[in-house]
Amino acid sequence: MKRTAMVMLIFTALYLATGVAGAQVTAAAAGDQVAAATPPAETPAIPATAVLQNITGPTYADLNCAGFITTEPPSEKTYVSGGWETPHASKFADRDYVYLSGGAVQVNSLYTILRHIKDPNRFEAFKNQQAVAATSGEAYAEIAHVRVAAVRGQNVGVAQVEYSCEAIVPGDFAVPFVEKPAVTLPHTIMFDRFAAPNGKTTGQIVLAKDFDQYLATGKKAYINIGADKGLKVGDYLRAVRNYEDARKNEVDTLSFKASTTEDTQKDPTMLPLSRLNELPRRTLGEMVVLGVYPHSSTVMIATSIADIMVGDHVELMDGPLLPPPPPPPPMNPPTIACQASPVSVRKGESSTVTCDVASPDNRQVSLSFSTSSGRITPRENTALLDTGTADPGAVTVVATATDDRNLSSTAQASVNVAGAAAPPAANNNEVQFAKGSARVDNKAKAILDGVALLMQQQADSSAVVIGMPDSESKAGAKLAMARAENVKKYLTASKGIDAKRIQTRAGTKTNGKAEIWVVPAGAPMP
């Protein structure tokens, strides 16, 4: 073994003995802390080995900076030939200007800057990694998005960097930008440490972004199954490892050579290494597909309980195993309180019942009213009680608040109804006419002015004018009616009283007068 490789193995072993072991202890502790949050044992959808885990959903940067491997390499014809500060600067980032040469570009068009990459170390995370990865294609890094602002000279595009994953350098190349579909994930999942094989599509992590060897939550990797196996953006996979895989790993196999027994043990029974495949496989984490290519896919680790390694296996899942739904929110009925104003009225008068209604659960609430007597007219959160038909005594108005779940509450308001007040008396005024005349003279007008003022003050009153004859005869009756009509004419034409408020009649008293009765609302007619 070469010295460099030996040093790397020793370093990795030390890392595993400290960092990974620590990570495993932390993950186990986290599992202990959330054990109380797992659903009851009788819930069939949640495996007994599942624990609640936080999950990381992909951001815009995750989607557009993940990179990919593909057997259909993009065209590298249009390349980055320099930038505004060439030759003093060779790296260009956000808002810098770069030059695109070698191919026709369109002004205001958006391009993705890619980089064809290789691993300068050529260290293999597992045996024949490079050959296995090569079957999935060449590796490319996604560097930035640029927009062409102008074209100058020999078809050189001047482009400004609108979004950068890392610095652009000369030799990177540009392809037309394609919007990537968004991928959404829940915030938490139930993570099954010992998930049994489900018989679905399997593959292997053959490479990782930045040629990383160990992957944790949020890291990007490339697997050797893609469109050829029916994968789609948003598909969900688990990363698994069995103990036989660990035996084949150059670093992990060192631990198998160490003693695992205690000096005090007498003839312990040991599992032969040849039977390691009998031990349950371990689920290390779960991942979501960000991009799909002919024979590969780009994935992001959504959650992990231990370091996932390049070379670990993957298995397609139906989707994240979601935790049980939270218990339904409390079912609180509406609250309601009502009061009447005024609380005491006479029969025929009205009272207004006002209610304060609220829903503790912020639900839509409707309000209805009923009354033990009288007539109720609802209007939003109030109701008008008309006591015209109510019996004297206490009248109870019941208000019911009902929400959209049919939960209801009631409240009452009482109104004391007294007997109706004595009807108001009609007011009588008289005017005298000259014998044989129906003319309204000045003395009569002075009296009628007072009648008009009273009717104006009592806007709901009416009047009855009864004209009296001088003698009992047909001519007398005709004169009596003329006297009544002239009184009405004076009140309407001269004083503006509505004619509809005045009735006229012919009386029988032979006194040559006219009686004017002003009748308040509710008073009986004379």
Image (spheres, grey):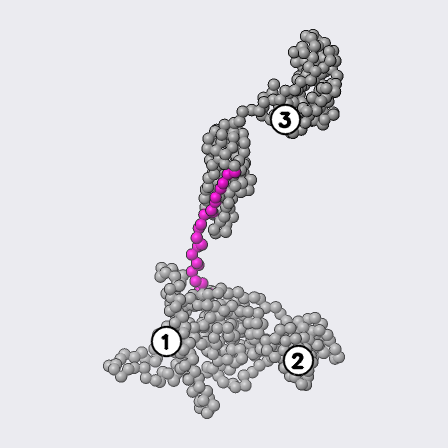
Q: CA distance from mark 3 to mark 2?
A: 98 Å
The image shows residue 478, relative to residue 379, as above or below, that is: above
Image depth: mark 3 or mark 1 in front = 3
Residue 187 visible in this rendered orientation of the protein: yes
Whether residue 195 is visible? no
Of discs 3 and 2, which sits in the foreground? 3
Give the SS element for disc 3. Answer: loop
Residue drawn at 26 percent across, 80 percent down: 268
**Residue span colored magenta:** 320-341
Q: Assess whether residue 328 is covered by the magenta stretch.
A: yes
Q: Earlier in the sequence, mark 2 or mark 1?
A: 2
N-terminal of the two: label 3 or label 1?
A: 1
- Which residue is nearer to you in this view: 522 or 238? 522
Q: Position of residue 357 (x, y in %)?
A: 50, 46
Instruction: Name which quarter of the figure residue 61 lies in.
Output: bottom right
In this image, 381 relative to 450: left or right? left
Q: Nearer the viewer, mark 2 or mark 1?
A: 2
Q: Is residue 379 left or right of residue 19?
A: right
The residue under label 3 is: 461
Q: Disc 1 marks which amino acid?
A: Asn
Image location of residue 295, percent across then percent down = 53, 74
Q: Is residue 98 magenta?
A: no
Amino acid type indicated by mark 2 = Val
For disc 1, the marked residue is: 277
> What type is the residue that disc 3 sits on?
Ser
Side (left or right) of 350 relative to 462 = left
